[in-house]
C-alpha cells in the first residue's frame, strides 16, 4: 500500500463514495487508489468546481464531501469556493497535494506556504508529516468539519507521503552508489533519517466524535412560554435548520406541529413541500413589523433582515443556531439558543398546548395570495422575446415531483426564488450568504450523484454561466444529465438595474446574446435555443426527455427585462 491507498481507505470508512478533482502529479496516487476501491472520481475543469461539488454533497447527504486538488495553483484556485462553504456552514474536506517535504522552501515546483494562504478561509488546516498519520488526519478532518459550526477543513499531504515507498526512496537517495565526500555522506544520512520518519510504522488512533450543540431544556422552556403567550408569532427557518440532512423530515414535521406561520430560506426552501398552509412566501418584511414574536431558526440577523432593522422594535426575537457569536449580532434577542436549529425545533414541537393563531395566519395568507396574483399578472404581460416570469411559471409546472433546483445567478435566479416551488426537503441549492456566482455546475454534479433518480434543474443567469459552462464537458464525460436553463438577457441585469439609473452608465454590465446552446452542443450535450414563448412547453418537454435518457441539456432562453425586481439590490 502507498499513501494514496491509506487516504482512500479512510475516506471509505467515512462513507465517501465520490470525490471531485482536477488531476495533478502531486495527487495521482489518491485518484488511482480511489478507482481501485470503487470510489467514483469525477474530474472537473476547474478546482473551484470540485470544491463546490464537495460542498453540495455535504449539504445533501450529511457525509463530508471531498475534493482533491494538486499543489500550488490547484490549491489557490479553491479559495472562493472554500470561503463560500465557510459562510454557508457547509462541512467538506479538501485534500491538497504539496511539494516533497525535503524540498519545501527550496524552490520546488508549485511550492508555497499553502497553510498560510488557505487558513483564513477554512475552519481548520492539517499538515500531515508521516505516512502513518494520513488516515488519522482524514478522520480528524471529517470530525472537525461536521462538529459545532460546520465548515471546510484543509488537509495537506506532500507528494512523498503518497507515492510507494520504493519510488520515494529512489527519489531521495537514487542509485548513484555510496558518496565519497564528507558532505555527500552527511546528506545521505540526513535523507535516510527523513525517510525513516516519513515511513515510521504505527497507526494513531482516531480522536473524538462529531459534536453537535444540543438545545438546553431551560431555553426550550423559555421559548415555549413565549410562543404560548404570543398572538402574532412567526418562524423563519434557514439553512442551519437542515444541517443534519437525515433529520430534515423530522424538522418538517416539527414545523407542522408548531403551527406557526413560516418563511423558509436558503437550504430550508422546500422543507414543507411545494405548497403548505403554514408556508408564507412573500411580504416577510411587513410581517416582521407586525409580529409580537419572531423565531429565527438557523437564520442569522444579517443583510437579509436589514441587519435587524426589518424587525419591529417591539418584537420579541428568538435566535437559534450553532454559531454562538452570531446569535447576538446586530440585535439583542429575548432568547439566544446555542444549538442545532433543526433539533431545537423538534424539541420545541414536543411541548403541548400550542396555539392556532388562525386570524394571524389568515391575514398573512391573504397577503401571500394577493402577491401571487400580482406576480401572475406580471407574468402574463407581453415582454419581447420571452417574459422571464412566464418562463419560470412554465418551468415550475414542468418540474418533476422529485426535482432538485440549483440556483446560480443574479436577477433571473432571484426572480426564480419567488416563482419556483421546491418539491421537498433539500430540494433547493443556492450558494448561501456569500452570494457567490459559479456554484451551478458543481452543485448540479453533486445533486445528480446524491439523488441519481431525481431531475436536476440548474437555473442559471447568463453572467453566472460563464463561470461553469466549460463543465458541460464534465457533464458529458461523467453522464450528469442535468437540465440547465440560462436566462439570457445579455447582461449583468441585477447590477445594471440599479447602476444605470444611479450612475448613468452601463459600463461592465453589457453582455452579448451568446449562443450558449451551441457551446453545450460542442461538448456533446443537447442544446436548445428558446426565443418564442409559444415553444416553451415543447422545449421543456424535449429537455426532460433528453435528460431522462441520460444526456445533459442546456436551454438558451432569450428573455426580456421587466421591472419585477426594481430596487432589490442588497449590500
Image (tube, rainbow, N blue to C red):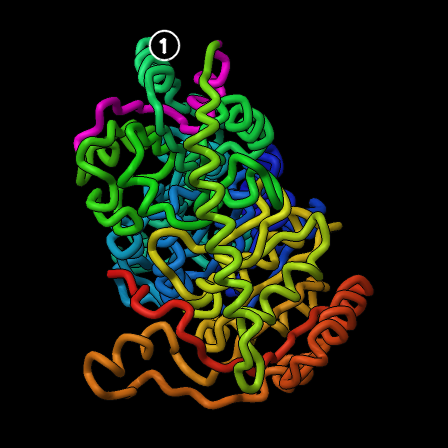
Is residue 161 depicted above or below 534 in this figure? above
Crowd tier of the residue under label 1, counting other residues whose Cα lies within 10 Å: few below 14, some 14–19, many 20 or above? few
476 lies left or right of 77:
right
Is residue 131 depicted above or below 377 in this figure? above
Q: Say which quarter of the image contains residue 554.
A: bottom right
Please name the residue shown 32% across and 47% down the image. 285
Q: In which quarter of the image is the N terminus?
A: top right
Q: Does dot 1 land on a helix, a strand or a loop?
A: helix
Q: Mark 1 points at which residue?
A: 217
User: In this view of the protein, can residue 265 be seen by the observer?
Assistant: yes
Percent coordinates x, y for residue 428 in the rendering: 54, 50
Please name the residue shown 38% across and 61% down the image. 436
In depth, the one of 119 and 146 nearer the eye is 146
Q: Say which quarter of the image contains residue 214.
A: top left
Is residue 408 depicted above or below 473 in this figure? above
Highlighted magenta segment, given as a residue range? 332-352
Residue 479 is one of the magenta-drawn residues: no
Percent coordinates x, y for residue 367 in the rendering: 44, 47
Amino acid at each position: 500500500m502507498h499513501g494514496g491507498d491509506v487516504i482512500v481507505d479512510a475516506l471509505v470508512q467515512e462513507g465517501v463514495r465520490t470525490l471531485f478533482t482536477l488531476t495533478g502529479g502531486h495527487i495521482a496516487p489518491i485518484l488511482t487508489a480511489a478507482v481501485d476501491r470503487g470510489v467514483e472520481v469525477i474530474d472537473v475543469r476547474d478546482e473551484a468546481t470540485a470544491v463546490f461539488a464537495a460542498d453540495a454533497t455535504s449539504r445533501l447527504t450529511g457525509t463530508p464531501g471531498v475534493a482533491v486538488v494538486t499543489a500550488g495553483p490547484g490549491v489557490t484556485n479553491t479559495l472562493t469556493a472554500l470561503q463560500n462553504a465557510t459562510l454557508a456552514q457547509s462541512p467538506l474536506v479538501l485534500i491538497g497535494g504539496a511539494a516533497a517535504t525535503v524540498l519545501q522552501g527550496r524552490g520546488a515546483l508549485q511550492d508555497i506556504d499553502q497553510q498560510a494562504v488557505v487558513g483564513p478561509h477554512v475552519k481548520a488546516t492539517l499538515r500531515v508529516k508521516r505516512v502513518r498519520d494520513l488516515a488519522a488526519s482524514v478522520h480528524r478532518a471529517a470530525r472537525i468539519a461536521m462538529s459545532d459550526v460546520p465548515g471546510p477543513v484543509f488537509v495537506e499531504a506532500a507528494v512523498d507521503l503518497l507515492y510507494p515507498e520504493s519510488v520515494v526512496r529512489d527519489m531521495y537517495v537514487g542509485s548513484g552508489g555510496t558518496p565519497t565526500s564528507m558532505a555527500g555522506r552527511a546528506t545521505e544520512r540526513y535523507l535516510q533519517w527523513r525517510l525513516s520518519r516519513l515511513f515510521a510504522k504505527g497507526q494513531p488512533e482516531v480522536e473524538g466524535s462529531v459534536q453537535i450543540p444540543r438545545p438546553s431544556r431551560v431555553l426550550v422552556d423559555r421559548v415555549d412560554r413565549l410562543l404560548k403567550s404570543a398572538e402574532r408569532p412567526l418562524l423563519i427557518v434557514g439553512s442551519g435548520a437542515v444541517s443534519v440532512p437525515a433529520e430534515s423530515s423530522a424538522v418538517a414535521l416539527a414545523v407542522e406541529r408548531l403551527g406557526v406561520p413560516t418563511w423558509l430560506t436558503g437550504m430550508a426552501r422546500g422543507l414543507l413541500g411545494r405548497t403548505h398552509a403554514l408556508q408564507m412566501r412573500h411580504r416577510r418584511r411587513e410581517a416582521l413589523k407586525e409580529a409580537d414574536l419572531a423565531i429565527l431558526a438557523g437564520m442569522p440577523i444579517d443583510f437579509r433582515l436589514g441587519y435587524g432593522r426589518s424587525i419591529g422594535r417591539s418584537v420579541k426575537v428568538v435566535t437559534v443556531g450553532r454559531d454562538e457569536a452570531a446569535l447576538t449580532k446586530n440585535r439583542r434577542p429575548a432568547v439566544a439558543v446555542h444549538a442545532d436549529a433543526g433539533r431545537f425545533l423538534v424539541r420545541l414541537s414536543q411541548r403541548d398546548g400550542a396555539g392556532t393563531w388562525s386570524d394571524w395566519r389568515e391575514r398573512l395568507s391573504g397577503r401571500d395570495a394577493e402577491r401571487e396574483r400580482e406576480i401572475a399578472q406580471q407574468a402574463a404581460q407581453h415582454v419581447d422575446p420571452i417574459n422571464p416570469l412566464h418562463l419560470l411559471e412554465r418551468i415550475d409546472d414542468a418540474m418533476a415531483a422529485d426535482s432538485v433546483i440549483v440556483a446560480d445567478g443574479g436577477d433571473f435566479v432571484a426572480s426564480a426564488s419567488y416563482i419556483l416551488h421546491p418539491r421537498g426537503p433539500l430540494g433547493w441549492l443556492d450558494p448561501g450568504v456569500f452570494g457567490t456566482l459559479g456554484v451551478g455546475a458543481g452543485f448540479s454534479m453533486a445533486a445528480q450523484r446524491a439523488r441519481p433518480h431525481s431531475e436536476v434543474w440548474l437555473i442559471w443567469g447568463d453572467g453566472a454561466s460563464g463561470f461553469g459552462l466549460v463543465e458541460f464537458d464534465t457533464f458529458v464525460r461523467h453522464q450528469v444529465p442535468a437540465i440547465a436553463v440560462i436566462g439570457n438577457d445579455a447582461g449583468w441585469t441585477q447590477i445594471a438595474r440599479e447602476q444605470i439609473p444611479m450612475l448613468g452608465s452601463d459600463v461592465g454590465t453589457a453582455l452579448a446574446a451568446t449562443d450558449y446552446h451551441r457551446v453545450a452542443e460542442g461538448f456533446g450535450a443537447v442544446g436548445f435555443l428558446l426565443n418564442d414563448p409559444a415553444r416553451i412547453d415543447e422545449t421543456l418537454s424535449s429537455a426532460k426527455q433528453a435528460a431522462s435518457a441520460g444526456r445533459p441539456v442546456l436551454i438558451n432562453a432569450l428573455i426580456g427585462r421587466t421591472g419585477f425586481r426594481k430596487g432589490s439590490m442588497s449590500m
